[in-house]
Structures are given as structure tokens and as C-alpha cells.
């Protein structure tokens, strides 16, 4: 069918030459009543890089020119206040009944309320929604102009049979710039470096973005990893918009290396097991149509390589798990206007715009010509989830322990269209008792496949794929895992979860996404003051808020008991004496904002443990926090850490450029955070003077916190700030000089095993972990482990494993669990897991009057490890209390 339609379309194209608004891959005649780019901005599509504000303005220009076929909707604002908007493009008849259509699509998305006749009637009547999104990475520039060009083409093309079919059967949503802050940052760099003519030399300044580059949004997040975590306003707005429209196909258009060609679906292995065959078949259907167009137009492409369909946080995977056929398209990037490839050929910005434009129109064409198929498959996906009887059938989430994260997780799930029910305290279900209540998430619901993926400890990788990866490793080849292998929200949130083989019959109350977390108070007499148990990050948030109000507080290094009430180490007491006169109103108001728990203390007498006047209670104050920034640090680590502290816990972070450290007034800050290192590393960026300034800061009483591979710098012999040593691979040859020199000792090899030992790199590090969740255990005598008596889960990535540290040199506050208890979710290489077991996760040591804390795997990765937020807050809030600096 497609080849016949393609041939007819191409025949039309050939016959329609002349009187063109501008040259396009389709050579279509355009309606002059629809403003083209040259008339609007003075250049054609692909000739210049359109700023984000102009991209949105052009949508409104199109809406003004064709109000019966275009409606522009602003769905969010970026951190920097830029609008994010999409254009709904449809025929006048369709747009006139858009509310009715959205209602019908919502009914198809929840087929539990439909009988077969009603379902079939809706499928026969409704248009299919195609969501085309562009520019999620701000420096992947060509897709935005391709999206604008697609919108123009659909509205202005005259007597085009493909466009007419698209209007007859679909609604097209064009979201041209998903990351306006990043795009603006890229354009500032490009414009400042631009000269008399564009340079194709990849090493010239217009192609060489300074830190942090335009890829990321304001808080330096990779927005293509944020879809289920929903930490950023851009993502929150977009996920809600997709739930509003229920598209059957979603395109996420990207760019890749300028030496590459063009990638479109089918995706690479591995596929998430919740993807159904109809979705894979549809990817193939769309890909074949793209292939026809690209072959005819002479565009090179590839499929089924590199870009997989496994991690649910991608811009293609999250919609896929909602029932859409969602795909990543990747175009080789000019990263400017011209790029000379290594083979000598030239890639232009206009080439990228052309290719994305053709793929966009081709996508809409396939859906339009198969409307009923796509709608039927979408309904079948949602229905198969709603009627599933797979084991387990549900998950119970406990409110005991980490109440803050459990409440936040329930709301996040609900905001993704997943039905979550609150259960009352004292409920028993699935072999467990929920004394403080909890949440029930059934998997037999329309969004059940997404819910299962997000909540189960492990999403299984295909066995044959992993056998192939192990074989590649044995042959000395790299693995083909594109992203992390684990993302279980209960594990990452440190929330106790219980699987249910059968869905329990218990009363529940629906959780609303925007409902505030209620504070918990008691009726205990507060004549002396209050106590805030140190149990989760919500409690720490209340402490931070009180500190900003100037309230005097003290934190305990030991557990204590008052009557039958036990308070864990880290808990904070607030004496009424010396507190503000409005302490009662203040703590109630701030606890309501944080959803925190506090209790009254009638006196300072305790029945077990230290009294508040003991030396085991340390004075707290609102910390002043700084963080290293710029060259030498990893942008996503710096951004996520700043985001977690500022936007989740209202703790301001002053960022200091690495190159300015040597002359900065570091003693103005209680805490200095070093995020993970960038590819250039910290040593060169800091220099000897910067390193010396940080040493002086710590010894004077500062709290220095290193995240992830910043531990390497802390432990370096030239830095000397923490006595930690990275381990080589346990099975690597130890003779670093083996094989060196012109003449080496001869060997007789008895078997291939001996050959592999000799071929291995001498002194090699452990093979990098692609990302798995592992259990960590607490040292209950360490202040940095407060709140983690029952342990937690950490995400391990990379190859860094640190040797055990002598008790006299440093404190191991948390360590990785024993081998048989280590893996919590995902996939680890066996030898990596063997070597990681029982090794340090968090180290701390005193340096002069201050402390150095090394968290060997970052707790702020993508800001989605909420169960480790308290770990960072321990360093930031409890750390200064342990400083011996004179106040």
C-alpha cells in the first residue's frame, strides 16, 4: 500500500514544480496566506538556528493565520521563565470538536468502562493523535526548525494527498522546543563565536561549547532521563500534556555525532519486557516508510543499533509504557551551520532540518493511513494491562520508616496516571502489617505496565541479549547496555515495598497528585520544647526551615527514650528557652509546609540515653553551603545536587567556579560540596593553589563533601584529604610492566584461560557497571549514617571500588552489603559484585577542626535517588554541628 501511495505522491511532486514558496524535500506548492519563515524571520528553514522565543512566536503566527486549524497551548514554563508550548494541528471539523475528541480518547485509555460496541464506535470515529517533539537537548538544534517546518508544511501545502490524508485521520501535536533554556545557552555560545562565515572545522569555537554546554536545562538536567522522576517543570508539564492527549505515536527527535547519518526505529535491543509485539511491529511499519522516503531522497540511515528501548525515563520509553508507539530519531549534528565529517563530506544545519522534517511527515503519513490499527493497538495495550493476572498483581508501599519519600512517591505515581490507593494504619495485607498505613498500587489497571516497571525491584533483561553481552566481555569487547539496568522507585526512595501475589481486598482512598503531605503532631506536653525525630528527609527539611528562622536547635549523636517514645540518633530538640516567642505557631506552620512530624517535650529529662544538655547533643545552625562549579565538574552532578538542596529542601547553594577557588573566601561557608568530576578532572582545574585553599578550609573547621568520583580527587596522594584507595580488578595481572619493552619473557600457554590472563591489562580497574541498585548497611556509631539504621539502596555506576579503610584513619559510615545480600535490582557483572561486597560506600574523617566526607557513589544522580537525600542532608545539616571551629 505504501509504495503505491509513495509513487503517487512523488508523481504529484514532480508535476507541481514552479510557484514554490521555497525549496523542500517534497517540492510542494504552498499557500501564500500562511506566513513562511523567510517572510517572518528573513531566512528560510535551515539557513539559521532559530532562537527558542522565535520558535514559540512562530507557532502563534501560524495560529493567527489559520485559527480554524491550529491551537497553541502553553503547557509549562522553564526555570528561567521561558514558555513551553505545543501546536495542535487538525482539520477545522476536528478542531471544532476537540473537547469531545479528548473525552473519547480518555475513554479509550481506560477501556474498563467500555463494552465492545462502544469501543469499536470510538475507534471508528476518533482521529489518532501523533505527538512530534523536538529539542529536548538544547544543543541538538536542527529538530526544532524541523518541527516548525512540519507545522508550516501541514498548514500551507496545497493539494498534497499525504497532507490531506493526515488531516482526515489524525491530530498532529508539534512541540518544537522541549528545552528552551538549554537552546538559548547554546545559541549564546554560537553567536559569540560566529565570524564572517560559518566554519566547518569541528575544533573552532562555534562548535566548542564551554561548560556546561547547551544540552541541559537550567538545573543542568538531561531531560531525556527525567520522564518518570518528573523532577523538572519541563518534564512535569509534558507528561501531563501527553496524558491529556493520549497520542498513539510519539516522536522524540534528537541529534548525535556529526560523523553519523540518521537513526530511526526499529529500536536496538534490549526491549523492555512490557513492550508488546504490536508496538514492535508498528516501529517496523513506520521505519520501512521512512526507508522508502530516505532512499528516494538519497538520505543515509541506520536502524536497530545503539538506541535501545529499555530504560523507562526516556522520552520515547515513558510514552511507550503508556501504550503509544514512541520512537527516538537521531540526526547527525552540525552543532552549528556547517560540519566537515571525518570522511571529508559536508553536513549542514539545513541537512539536519531536511532529514528530521521528512521523518516527521513520514511518521504522520503512516499513522494517518493506519488510523484504526494504531487506535486499536493502543486500546489493546491498555486493556491487556487492566485485565492482567500476572504475578505479582499488586504492590503495597509502607509509610513506616521513610514516610516523606513514600508520600512523595505515591503522588508522583498518581501524576503519571497510575491509580494509587491509600490504606489506613493498622491494615494487614499480602503477609505484612502496615502499622502507620501505606499505599496500594494494583497492576491490573490501564497504566499497570508502567506501574509494574517502576515498582518491581528488577525489570528483566532478555536472557539471550545478556548472554551475548557476557560473550562480548569474554572477548574483550564492550557491552551494549545504553543506560542503567535498575530504577525501582521503592528501592531508590528507601521505602519498604511488599509484593502481592493476589490483589488484596482492602479499603483504599485515591491519592491525588497535588495533595499536600499532612504534618503529624502529638498531644504531648511541650512545656520545655519540641523534638523532631531524624527519620527521613522531610524531617530534615523542617529542621532546615527552622534554622533559617534563627531557631536554636541541638542534635543527638545517640538514641534516647522519653517514656515509651524512642528517638533515633540525629533527632533534633528545640528548647523553648531562647526560642522565638511564636515558636508554637512557627513550628506548626513550617511542619505543615514540609509534611513533617514533631512531638512535644514536657521537660529535658530523658529515661534512657543522653539529656539535651549532654555533650552528645551538638548545637545546630542554618548552614551556609557552597559547591564547586564549572570546568572540572560534571554538569549533571553539579546541577542535580544544587537542585536537590535548593528546590526540594529550600537550602540555598552558592556556586563557586573551580578556577576561582584559590582566591575565594571559603571560610564564609560551613559546607563545601564537590560534585562528580567532569572529563577534564579537578586536579588541573583547581591547580596547586586551589587544592591548598580547600585543605586550609577543612582544617579550619569546614565540612567538605565529595560525591561519586570526586572521591578519587580527595584520595589522590597529591590531595591527601581522605585515606582511601581505589582497587584494581581482583583478577587482573599485578605486574604493571608485563609486556613492556622490546623483549619480553617467552611463555608457554596451556589453555585459553592463561591466554586471557596475559591479554588482560595489567593493573586494570574493575569493569564498569552500567548501573544497578545495591543494598548498603549502616555503621550505627557514625553520625553520617543517622536515619539509616535499616540501610538503604544505592545506585552503582562505573568502575570505582574502594578498599576497606583502617578504623584509625577514617570512619566507614555505610558499606555495601555482603555478597549474598548485595544486589537489590538490575544487573551486575559477577566479578564486580564479588569485589564490591562489604567495601566502603560512605567514608568520613576529621581533618583539623573540620571533616571530609566521601560518598563513593553519588546520592544525587538525576535527583531520583530520594532515599539517599537524607544522606546528603546529614552532611549538610549535621556536619557543621560536628565542626570544631570556634564560633
Image (cartoon, rainbow, N blue to C red):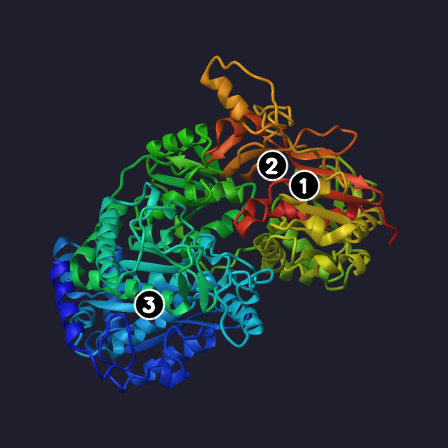
Mark toward the start of the polypeptide (3 vs 2) = 3
Distance (Cα) linking label 3 and label 1: 45 Å
Along the horizontal axis of the image, is 765 left or right of 294?
right
Residue linked to disc 2 = 800
Placement of 166 over or under 466, stated as above or below: below
Q: Position of residue 245 (x, y in %)?
A: 31, 64
Residue linked to disc 1 = 712
Mark toward the start of the polypeptide (3 vs 1) = 3
Return the residue found at the far front.
742
Distance (Cα) linking label 3 and label 2: 43 Å
Q: Position of residue 10 (x, y in %)?
A: 17, 68
Residue linked to disc 3 = 354
Placement of 26 over or under 228, stated as above or below: below
Residue lying at 38% horizontally and 72% vertically, measured from the top left: 46
SS under mark 1: helix
> Looking at the figure, which quarter contains the C terminus?
bottom right
Mark nearer the viewer, 3 or 2: 3
Amino acid at each position: 500500500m505504501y509504495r503505491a501511495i509513495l509513487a503517487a505522491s512523488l508523481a504529484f511532486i514532480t508535476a507541481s514544480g514552479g510557484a514554490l514558496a521555497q525549496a523542500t524535500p517534497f517540492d510542494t506548492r504552498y499557500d501564500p496566506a500562511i506566513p513562511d519563515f523567510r517572510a517572518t524571520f528573513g531566512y528560510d528553514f535551515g539557513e539559521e538556528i532559530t532562537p527558542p522565543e522565535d520558535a514559540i512566536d512562530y507557532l502563534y503566527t501560524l495560529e493567527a493565520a489559520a485559527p480554524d486549524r491550529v491551537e497553541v497551548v502553553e503547557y509549562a514554563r522553564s526555570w528561567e521563565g521561558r514558555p513551553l508550548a505545543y501546536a495542535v494541528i487538525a482539520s477545522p471539523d476536528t478542531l471544532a470538536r476537540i473537547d469531545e475528541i479528548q473525552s473519547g480518547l480518555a475513554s479509550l485509555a481506560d477501556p474498563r468502562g467500555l463494552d465492545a460496541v462502544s469501543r469499536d464506535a470510538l475507534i471508528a470515529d476518533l482521529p489518532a493523535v501523533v505527538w512530534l517533539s523536538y529539542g529536548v537537548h538544547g544543543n541538538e538544534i536542527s529538530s526544532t526548525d524541523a518541527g516548525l517546518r512540519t507545522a508550516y508544511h501541514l498548514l500551507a501545502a496545497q493539494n498534497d494527498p499525504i497532507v490531506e490524508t493526515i488531516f482526515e485521520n489524525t491530530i498532529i501535536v508539534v512541540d518544537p522546543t522541549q528545552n528552551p533554556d538549554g537552546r538559548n545557552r547554546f545559541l549564546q555560545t554560537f553567536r559569540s563565536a560566529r565570524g564572517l562565515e560559518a566554519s566547518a572545522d569541528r575544533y573552532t569555537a562555534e562548535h566548542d561549547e564551554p561548560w556546561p554546554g547547551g544540552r541541559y536545562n537550567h538545573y543542568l538536567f538531561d531531560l531525556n532521563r527525567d520522564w518518570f522522576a518528573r523532577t523538572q517543570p519541563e518534564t512535569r508539564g509534558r507528561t501531563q500534556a501527553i496524558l491529556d492527549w493520549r497520542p498513539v505515536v510519539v516522536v522524540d527527535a534528537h541529534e548525535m555525532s556529526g560523523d553519523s547519518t540518521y537513526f530511526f526505529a526499529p529500536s536496538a535491543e534490549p526491549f523492555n519486557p512490557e513492550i508488546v509485539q504490536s508496538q514492535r511491529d508498528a516501529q517496523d511499519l513506520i521505519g520501512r516508510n521512512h526507508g522508502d522516503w530516505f532512499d528516494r531522497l538519497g538520505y543515509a540511515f541506520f536502524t536497530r543499533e545503539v538506541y535501545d528501548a529499555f530504560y523507562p525515563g526516556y522520552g520515547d520509553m515513558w510514552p511507550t509504557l503508556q501504550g503509544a508507539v514512541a520512537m527516538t530519531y537521531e540526526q547527525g549534528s552540525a552543532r552549528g551551520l556547517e560540519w566537515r565529517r571525518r570522511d571529508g563530506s559536508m553536513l549542514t544545519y539545513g541537512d539536519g532540518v531536511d532529514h528530521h522534517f521528512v521523518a516527521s511527515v513520514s511518521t504522520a503519513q503512516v499513522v494517518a493511513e493506519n488510523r484504526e490499527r494504531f487506535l486499536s493497538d493502543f486500546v489493546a495495550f491498555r486493556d491487556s494491562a487492566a485485565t492482567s493476572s500476572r504475578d505479582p498483581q499488586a504492590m503495597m508501599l509502607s509509610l513506616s520508616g521513610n514516610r516523606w519519600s513514600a508520600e512523595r512517591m505515591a503522588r508522583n505515581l498518581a501524576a503519571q496516571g497510575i491509580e494509587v490507593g491509600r490504606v489506613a494504619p493498622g491494615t494487614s495485607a499480602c503477609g505484612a502489617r502496615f502499622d502507620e498505613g501505606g499505599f496500594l498500587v494494583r497492576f491490573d489497571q490501564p497504566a499497570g505496565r508502567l506501574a509494574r516497571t517502576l515498582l518491581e525491584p528488577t525489570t528483566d533483561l532478555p536472557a539471550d541479549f545478556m548472554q551475548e553481552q557476557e560473550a562480548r566481555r569474554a572477548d574483550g569487547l564492550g557491552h551494549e547496555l545504553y543506560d542503567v539496568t535498575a530504577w525501582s522507585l521503592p528501592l531508590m526512595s528507601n521505602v519498604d515495598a511488599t509484593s502481592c501475589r493476589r490483589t488484596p481486598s482492602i479499603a483504599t482512598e485515591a491519592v491525588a497528585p497535588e495533595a499536600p503531605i499532612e504534618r503529624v503532631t502529638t498531644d504531648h506536653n511541650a512545656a520545655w520544647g519540641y523534638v523532631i525525630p531524624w527519620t527521613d528527609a522531610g524531617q530534615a527539611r523542617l529542621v532546615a526551615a527552622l534554622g533559617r528562622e534563627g531557631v536554636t536547635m541541638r542534635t543527638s549523636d545517640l538514641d534516647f527514650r522519653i517514656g515509651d517514645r524512642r528517638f533515633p540518633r540525629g533527632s533534633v530538640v528545640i528548647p523553648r528557652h531562647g526560642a522565638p516567642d511564636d515558636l508554637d505557631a512557627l513550628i506548626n506552620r513550617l511542619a505543615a509546609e514540609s509534611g513533617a512530624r514533631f512531638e512535644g517535650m514536657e521537660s529535658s529529662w530523658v529515661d534512657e540515653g543522653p539529656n539535651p544538655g549532654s555533650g552528645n547533643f551538638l548545637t545546630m545552625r542554618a548552614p551556609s553551603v557552597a559547591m564547586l562549579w564549572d570546568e572540572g565538574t560534571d554538569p549533571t552532578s553539579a546541577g542535580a545536587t544544587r537542585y536537590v538542596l535548593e528546590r526540594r529542601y529550600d537550602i540555598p547553594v552558592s556556586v563557586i567556579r573551580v578556577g576561582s577557588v584559590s582566591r575565594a573566601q571559603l571560610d564564609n561557608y560551613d559546607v563545601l560540596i564537590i560534585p562528580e568530576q567532569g572529563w577534564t578532572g579537578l586536579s588541573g582545574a583547581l591547580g596547586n593553589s586551589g587544592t591548598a585553599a580547600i585543605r586550609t578550609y577543612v582544617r579550619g573547621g569546614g565540612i567538605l563533601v565529595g560525591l561519586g568520583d570526586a572521591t578519587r580527587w580527595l584520595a589522590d596522594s597529591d590531595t591527601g584529604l581522605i585515606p582511601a584507595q581505589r582497587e584494581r580488578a581482583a583478577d587482573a595481572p599485578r605486574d604493571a610492566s608485563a609486556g613492556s619493552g622490546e623483549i619480553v619473557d617467552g611463555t608457554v600457554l596451556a589453555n585459553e584461560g592463561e591466554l586471557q590472563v596475559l591479554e588482560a591489562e595489567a593493573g586494570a580497574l574493575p569493569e564498569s557497571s552500567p548501573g544497578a541498585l545495591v543494598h548498603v548497611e549502616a555503621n550505627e556509631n557514625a553520625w553520617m549514617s543517622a536515619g539509616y539504621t535499616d540501610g538503604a539502596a544505592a545506585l552503582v555506576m562505573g568502575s570505582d571500588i574502594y578498599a576497606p579503610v583502617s578504623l584509625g584513619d577514617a570512619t566507614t559510615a555505610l558499606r555495601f552489603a555482603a555478597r549474598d545480600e548485595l544486589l537489590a535490582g538490575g544487573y551486575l557483572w559477577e566479578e564486580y559484585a564479588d569485589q564490591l561486597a562489604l567495601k566502603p560506600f560512605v567514608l568520613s574523617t576529621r581533618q583539623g577542626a573540620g571533616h571530609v566526607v566521601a560518598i563513593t557513589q553519588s546520592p544525587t544522580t538525576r535527583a531520583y535517588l530520594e532515599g539517599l537525600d537524607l544522606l546528603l542532608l546529614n552532611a549538610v545539616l549535621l556536619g557543621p554541628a560536628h565542626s570544631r571551629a570556634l564560633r
